[in-house]
Amino acid sequence: MTQNPNLNLWLIPLLPLAGAALNGLFGARFPKRMVTAIAWIFPGLAFLQALWITSKFSGLGLPYIESHGAWVQISSFTVDFGFYLDQLSLVMLLVVTGVGFLIHIYSAGYMWEEGGYYRFFAYLNLFMFFMLMLILANNYLLMFVGWEGVGLASYLLIGFYFLKHSASQAGKKAFIVNRIGDFAFLLGMFLLIKTFGAASGTEVNPVGAVNVLDFTHIFSSIAGHPEMFAIGTAGSLTLTIIAFCMMFGATGKSAQIPLYTWLPDAMEGPTPVSALIHAATMVTAGIYMVARSSIIFDHAPAAQAAVAVIGAVTAIFAASIGITQFDIKRVLAYSTVSQLGYMFMACGVAAYSAAIFHLMTHAFFKALLFLSAGAVIHSLHHEQDMRNMGGLRKKLPITFAVMLVGTIAIAGIPPFAGFFSKDEILWKAYSSPHGHWALWLIGIITALMTSFYMFRMLFMTFLGERREAAHGHEEDGHGHDHHEIHESPWVMLAPLVILAALSIVGGWYWKPAVFSGENKFDAFLSPVFEHKAEPAAHMPAGGAPQTGAVESHDETALAVPSHAAPNGAGEHGNEELEHQLAYLSVAIALMGLGLAYLLYVRRPELPARIAESLGGSYKAVYNKYYVDEAYQAAVVDPIVDGSTDVLWKGMDVGVIDGAVNGAGTSAKFLSDRLRRMQSGNIRSYAVWVALGAAAVLAYMIYMGVQ
Amino acid sequence: MNPTTNEIQSIAILPELILSVAGIVVMLADPFLGAKSNRRPLGYLALAGTVAALFATAMQRSSPGASYFRVIQVDDFSVFFHFVIIAITAVVTLSSLDYLEQQRIRAGEYYALLLFGTVGMCLMTSARELLMLFIALEISSIATYVLAGFRLRSAASAESSLKYFLLGSFATAFFLYGVALIYGATGTTNIPAIAAKLAEGSTTGLTVMALALMIVGMAFKISAAPFHVWTPDVYEGAPIPVVALMSTGPKAAAFALMLRVLFGAFGSLNEWWMPLIWVAAVLSMTLGNIGALMQNNVKRMLAYSSIAHAGYVLVAFAAQKEAGVSAAIFYTATYAAMNVGAFAVASYQAGEGERYVSIDDFAGLGRRSPVLATTLTIFMLSLIGIPLTGGFFAKFYVFKAALASDMIWLTVIGVANSAIAAYYYLRLIVVMYMKEGDESTPLLPVPVSVATGLLVAAGLTLYLGILPESTLDFAIKGARQLLLIH
Amino acid sequence: MTDNQLLPYLPVLLQLLVAAGIGAGMVALSAIIGHRKYSRVKMQAYECGMTPTGDAQHRFSVKFYLVAMLFILFDVEAIFLIPWAVVYKDLLRKFGWFGFWEMIIYIGIVLVGLIYIWKKGVIDWNVDDAKESASGSD
């Protein structure tokens, strides 16, 4: 790969870091315009560089690897400070820098009036740095640095309105839930080291490679030893455990069951943050990680199936909650969880390119939806309850237009972007050898729900009558609310329009094979995921599409016996079926639209009646199935109680309270303390030590007897 | 064994000599200063002593080997720990300068005791003779017993000192008893000689009992569960800079001692002590982390946290071999940097009479003093184990080593524990930045000495996280020499 | 532990038993055959043959304890000189002046300690001072 030009990939993450450093250290003293300029220029430059790389991309030998020397080096274990670029990271790079840049522009308008303006942009740029590290890393350790870093930045940004108690609590919750996922990722990484860090000369490591966490090393080790990792062998079992660990890590970052609870709470953060981190970029890190590790998942069918099931269940579960929510941002949050479920499901059926495609289109339309929701909230002076909205179409025509685009896109109505990607996932869920009709069924029901609740949101917000007076929630803004509602400034609208355009055309690049005969996106990404058919997939593929799939009959075929088919002849006969399913999903989407129109525009009194007639089950859904409460009762409380009752009350209070109360006072207290101390505590401590010693001695005697 | 004059190489104890002389000078100078005069110059003198000792340690690298009748061993292992311990003392001295003035403690002996304690700790890392180790242990312990009681007007401080003294003597007695038994069993107290004896002969009841008693004594010193009960009380009462020292310096030294004793003397008996270390590691991590969850006093919280961190180091012990030993060494250094830093912030924030030590008192620190808040955030993130801080790499190597030795459950428990631990460290960050401070807790601008100490600690914490390589290399060399010599 | 290992310690055990036996036996014998006659003087607390003043719960100046501690310290230091003196010729032969200077340094440190406590006023028996430090420490 020496013929590759120097792309200076290292600059891409470092540019936003420089912006973060400048604004973070000196921002307090800069004028606001200067802060804005810094915050725009650095991510903007990163985006330009990404575009420049794209222009050179076809001439690159892939994967393009750029190493900047060893970061950590100990005898048989080295981690490079290196970057890795292939089709997958290019797509992610463009999405993150592009959408990220637009959101930076928007934020300047949204946050202009807020305190801590410079701090906000410092955090936002910091987030960009970690996110870019995550997607450009050439090994799992560096990826983990980005992985933890985005969690940290997200924590800072969620808690940005730190005077709000709920915001700081939400930030903490997000961080800790993510830590639980990270714990699994870390375990997976240790297992990778153990598995692929075998001593030089052994089978997995014949040349004694020391970069054991490098993607190339791991992927080529697996691809190069099909017999070792064939399904059913011990090697495959190891990979399955690793894949389960990674999957659990991904459920944390990508807000899947069981670790999704932090994402809806994360909506406490400023809306641009929700758009950037909790919709477009960070939450897709889990999907990216699974896709990046696709070769591991391909050799771990159990984990793969689990990914598919988790994705499907999360999709429908979150969608059902979304139907009942009234907070506009929470609706979008649950919709995000649900859409991430789709992507997870796609990964689970080995349709990685479909997952990444949906990731991309979702980044467009979900960022759009969040930002336009932000524009609505901004116009209404931080009103987020949809029951207090309505009739905003005339006041906010542009916002309405772009939000309509976003809604159509997410609902899956052609020719908008969401249709192509969602339909591809549904088709793969049905047709892939790893798929199942039940997954498809869940997917299509979710699609119905999605369409319904998204149009519900749109109608409640923009159509009908303004309801704010009836509820009288906003006491201070009562009289002059109507006069103050105005369209957002152009600095906010421009990114919306661009994102709307992308939400429309973003899917056309794909053009599913059935409709146009050319599956460009899949062809573009396939070299990354074609490892099972081609042991040397990590070798330069030259960006040429469809290089795989040809040699599907060599010895690796037995690793994934059923997988050679998807792009092959078997699919051809299914063309008819694919057409039918596509029409069905369009019909379903329109049905959701119609239902929402009926319930929220024509007969607005109906929903309340329906909710009433459903009674308890509605309440359960409205309260998000009480999952938070269940976690509180099952996990948090026992730990806290254990800590409080056993350690705190049992061991501490008697001892400490006296000390705390008595500290720093007169001699009388000292004598009192000393008396109390000698009458119990210190002796009990000595007893602890003595008991411990007795236990150690007893153990030694026991060992001696044995 | 025919000792000759070339056994006496003063370079082998040069750092200790410098520290002792500095300590004696400080001690002697103190009574000659007026009762009301400022003790700050004595602090600077002590600081100069530590800096000189650091240079002396650097010089030691070029003359390794055993000397003083095979009592002192200079190698990368001892040099590494000398650096760590003396640097800890330097930072503690820096944060003590203003602390003592704040608390109106006018006693130059404080600095003298710091230096004497450091001498003991340093010797603990370079002695390879059990009697010398014991004496070194006592030198460091007695100094810290006295230091713990230095808040003369505080009942809690006196309580802390007395408890530490009584329980500490109790535990050292175990260690000494173990030394006596091993002498009875092998006829020597020289560690390599013991190792040689144990390697050739069969294991007797006497050696095993000696091992058990010494483990008890050492586990107490590193506050590993179930010998940790004293830690929260003692840490809560003692002056904060002293806690900074106690939780890092003597601990680092005790880890060094433990490495030398377990891997040096009892290396051939590892299947005997390994399960004990395993259990102690699990107990320490779990009890430490759960105990820390509900603490409202920062000192107590950090006390429990130090118990948990001792558990992580013990995981490395259990991992064995070069990887485990080097991970333990590296962890000790990292822990020292971040913990001394955290306590340095706490000691300045505490105010007169250590009034502001509850977690709520840190509210709004982000606004009142960005320097303190930023550095404390770095230390907390490092204690959590976030990448790009030393804490992450330290944990990473520990668990990597544990897994390489097939200690899967220990790794799982350890990593799970480090996930739980995020909660209580994060709480402090949340409070600092996300709660409004009480107006009645004002803060002066950070003085130069405190700022210097903090910058050193924060710089090292980040350095160990971003460029861990050279330090790690050093630790590996130390581990290799420790395992080879014996 | 097996008997074999403990065998060399048997004489120690015997010694212990004999010592304990003699001690216990003497107390027991005097209790059994002793002659008891209580008088006022006999029941008084023993105070070095002086007539007792006050009761046993009397508070002593902290100086007493300090002096006792210092006495022990310097006592032990003096004892430390004896083994050194015994092997001094050997030391001189093997290491030249090393042993000599070691002891000079040692005595120097002891001297520094003495100067320190002197300057601190520990051995200054000024009455006011004693009162002050006694009241300061309770």
Image (tube, rainbow, N blue to C red):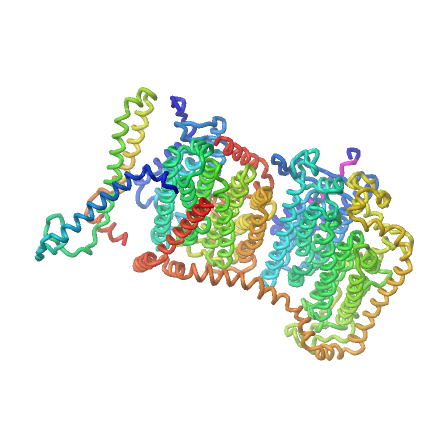
Magenta region, main secondary structure: loop
Q: Nearer the viewer, residue B321 or B250?
A: B321
Q: Nearer the viewer, residue B324 or A156?
A: B324
Q: Is residue A5 magenta?
A: yes
Q: Position of residue A72 (x, y in %)?
A: 62, 38
Q: Position of residue B188 (x, y in %)?
A: 38, 33
- The tally of labels here is 0
Q: Nearer the viewer, residue A197 or C73?
A: A197
Q: In the rendered view, tell whether residue A17 sits above or below residue A497.
A: above
Q: Nearer the viewer, residue B26 or C102?
A: C102
Question: Most extreme residue toward the front, as rendered?
Answer: C3
Left or right: B436 as drawn, with respect to A316? left
Q: Which residues are magenta?
A: A4-14
Q: Which residue is pictured at 59% across the width and 60% down the height?
A: A168
Q: Where the N terminus of chain B falls, by quadrant?
A: top left
Q: In the rendered view, tell whether residue A341 sits above or below residue B310.
A: below
Q: Is residue A353 magenta?
A: no
Residue C67 appears anywhere in the view: no
| Quarter occupied by residue A538 | top right
Residue A675 appears anywhere in the view: yes
Q: Position of residue B345 (x, y in %)?
A: 48, 49
Q: Which residue is pictured at 14% across the width and 50% down the height?
A: C30
Q: In the rendered view, tell whether residue A407 sits above or below residue A293.
A: below
Left or right: B385 as drawn, with respect to C63? right
Q: Position of residue A560 (x, y in %)?
A: 78, 48
